[in-house]
Image (cartoon, grey):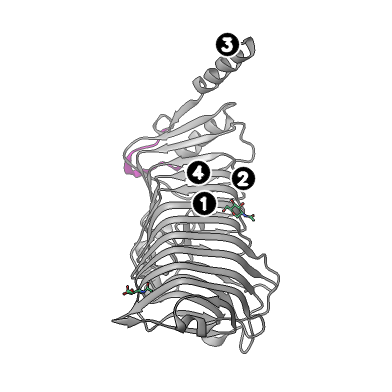
C-alpha cells in the first residue's frame, strides 16, 4: 500500500469507528407504550445531530408513545444520521391529545437521514370514525413527513393507521423509499399512502400499500419520479393529481410507474386535474407492466374534476397533458369502460400511446372512451378508434 492508501484506509476505519450510537432508552424513552417518550426522542436527535461524524439513533423493541415531534436538521453537524428502529412508535389514540393539523412526525431541512425498520402507528381510528359520521372533525395529521430535505432513505418501514396521509415527501431532492408497508383499512378517509410533491429524484420501490385513499399521489412540481414494484389495494390507485387548482402551478414531468399490481382498487393509473384555468402540465409519463384485478377505473384521465360543480362551472382544465404512454397493461376491470380518457376541452391531451393494453370485463373485452384525446393505439380496434 502506498502511504496515501494507508492514510485513506485508516481514515475510513476511523470514521466508521466514530459512528456513535444513541439509544433512545438512554435518553429516558420508555418502551411500555404509556409514558410519553417525545422528549427522549428529541434529545437523542439533538445528540445525533450535534455529532461531528455519522451517527445512529437506535430504537429497541417495544412501544413508544410519541406526540407531535419535529426533527429539524438545519443546524446539524452530523453529515449522516441513520435511525434504526426495532420498535413501534405510537401516536396518542385520542386525536385531541395532539395538534392534528400538520404532521405527527416531521423531518425538515435534513440531509442524509435514513430510517431503517420500525412501525409508525398513527392510531387514526377515532378520527376516521368522526370523519365518517360527518361531524365537525379536525383535519388530522400526516404520520411521517419530510419537508425540504435531501438524500433521504426509508427502508423496511411500516406506516399504519394514519389520521391522514401516511408518508409525505414535499420539497425534497433524492429520496429512496423501499420495502415500505402502508396498512390502513379501505374505509379510512383521506389516508393517502405516499404523497409526493415539489420534489425531484424520488424513487418508491418494492412496497405494499393498502389504504382508504390513493396508494401513491403525485402533486404539482414533481420531476424524475420512479415508482416500481408496488402492490396497491385496497385504495384509490396511483394518481397524478389532483392538479390545476392553482392558476400558477408547477408541472409534473418524467414519471415512470412500472411493475405494479392493483387489486380491487377504485382506480388503477389516473391523471386528475381540476376543470379550472391553470398553467400546469403533465408530460413524459410511462405506465408499464401493470396488472389490474377487478379495478373500477383501470386507466383514467379525468380533466373535468369539479366536485359539486363548485369553483369551476363550465371551465376547461388548463393543465396540458402530453406524452403519456400506457404499455403492457392487462387484467380485469370491474366496470364496462376500462380506458377512460376525458381530457380538457380547452387543452386536449396529445401524444397518448396505448400499446399492448388488454383489459377484460366479465367475459368480454372492456370498452374504451376518449374525449379530446389524441395519440395512437396499437392492437385492439376499440382502442385505436378511441384516439
Ligand atoms: C427521468 O427520471 C429518471 C429517474 O426517475 C432519470 O434517471 C432520468 O435521467 C430522467 N430523464 C430525464 C430526461 O431527465
Ligand atoms: C386479451 O386478454 C384475454 C383475457 O385475458 C385473452 O384471452 C386474450 O388472448 C388476450 N388477447 C391478446 C391479444 O393478448
Q: CA distance from mark 3 to mark 1?
A: 39 Å
Q: Which residue is mark 2?
A: 109
First-in-chain label (4 vs 1): 4
**Residue 212, horizontal then vertical, whole percent:** 39, 67
The segment highlighted magenta reads 28-38
Q: Which residue is mark 4?
A: 153
Q: Dot 3 corresponds to which residue?
A: 1
**Mark in the foreground, 3 or 1:** 3
Could you tell me if the residues under marks 2 and 3 are in contact, i.e. CB atoms within 8 Å?
no
Rounded to the nearest angstrom, the CA distance separating label 2 from label 4 is 14 Å
Give the foreground label among 2 and 3. 3
Q: Tag 1 or tag 3, which sits nearer the N-term? A: 3
Residue closer to the observer: 98 or 151: 151
- Locate residue 233, reporting x and y percent: 36, 65
Picture coordinates of residue 67, whole percent (x, y): 44, 49
What separation in Å lies between label 4 and label 1 (alpha carbons)? 10 Å
The furthest residue to the left: 363
Query: Is residue 121 among the parts visible in the rendering?
Result: no
Q: Is residue 200 left or right of residue 130?
A: right
Q: Which residue is mark 1?
A: 203
* Residue 77 versus residue 337 in the image, above or below: above
Q: Quadrant of the C terminus?
A: bottom right
Eye-nearest disc, 2 or 4? 4
Check disc 3 and report its element: helix, strand or loop.
Answer: loop
Amino acid at each position: 500500500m502506498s502511504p496515501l492508501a494507508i492514510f485513506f484506509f485508516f481514515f475510513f476505519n476511523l470514521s466508521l469507528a466514530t459512528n456513535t450510537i444513541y439509544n433512545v432508552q438512554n435518553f429516558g424513552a420508555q418502551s411500555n407504550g404509556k409514558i410519553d417518550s417525545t422528549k427522549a426522542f428529541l434529545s437523542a436527535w439533538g445528540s445525533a445531530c450535534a455529532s461531528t461524524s455519522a451517527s445512529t439513533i437506535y430504537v429497541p423493541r417495544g412501544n413508544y408513545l410519541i406526540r407531535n415531534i419535529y426533527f429539524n436538521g438545519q443546524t446539524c453537524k452530523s453529515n449522516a444520521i441513520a435511525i434504526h428502529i426495532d420498535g413501534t412508535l405510537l401516536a396518542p389514540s385520542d386525536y385531541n391529545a395532539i395538534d392534528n393539523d400538520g404532521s405527527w412526525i416531521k423531518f425538515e431541512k435534513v440531509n442524509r437521514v435514513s430510517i431503517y425498520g420500525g412501525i409508525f402507528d398513527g392510531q387514526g381510528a377515532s378520527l376516521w370514525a368522526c370523519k365518517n359520521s360527518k361531524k365537525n372533525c379536525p383535519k388530522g395529521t400526516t404520520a411521517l413527513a419530510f419537508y425540504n430535505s435531501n438524500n433521504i432513505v426509508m427502508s423496511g418501514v411500516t406506516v399504519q393507521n394514519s389520521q391522514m396521509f401516511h408518508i409525505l415527501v414535499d420539497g425534497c431532492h433524492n429520496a429512496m423509499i423501499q420495502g415500505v408497508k402502508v396498512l390502513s383499512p379501505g374505509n379510512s378517509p383521506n389516508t393517502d399512502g405516499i404523497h409526493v410533491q415539489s420534489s425531484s429524484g424520488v424513487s418508491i420501490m418494492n412496497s405494499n400499500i393498502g389504504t382508504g385513499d390513493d396508494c401513491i399521489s403525485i402533486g404539482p412540481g414533481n420531476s424524475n419520479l420512479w415508482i416500481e414494484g408496488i402492490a396497491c389495494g385496497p385504495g384509490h390507485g396511483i394518481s397524478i393529481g389532483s392538479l390545476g387548482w392553482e392558476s400558477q402551478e408547477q408541472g409534473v414531468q418524467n414519471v415512470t410507474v412500472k411493475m405494479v399490481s392493483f387489486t380491487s382498487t377504485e382506480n388503477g393509473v389516473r391523471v386528475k386535474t381540476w376543470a379550472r384555468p391553470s398553467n400546469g402540465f403533465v408530460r413524459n409519463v410511462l405506465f408499464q407492466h401493470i396488472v389490474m384485478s377487478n379495478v373500477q377505473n383501470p386507466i383514467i384521465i379525468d380533466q373535468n374534476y369539479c366536485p359539486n360543480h363548485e369553483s369551476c362551472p363550465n371551465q376547461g382544465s388548463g393543465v396540458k397533458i402530453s406524452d403519456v404512454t400506457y404499455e403492457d397493461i392487462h387484467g380485469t376491470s370491474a366496470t364496462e369502460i376500462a380506458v377512460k380518457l376525458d381530457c380538457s376541452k380547452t387543452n386536449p391531451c396529445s401524444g397518448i400511446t396505448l400499446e399492448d393494453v388488454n383489459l377484460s370485463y366479465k367475459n368480454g373485452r372492456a370498452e374504451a372512451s376518449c374525449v379530446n384525446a389524441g395519440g395512437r393505439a396499437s392492437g385492439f380496434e376499440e382502442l385505436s378508434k378511441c384516439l
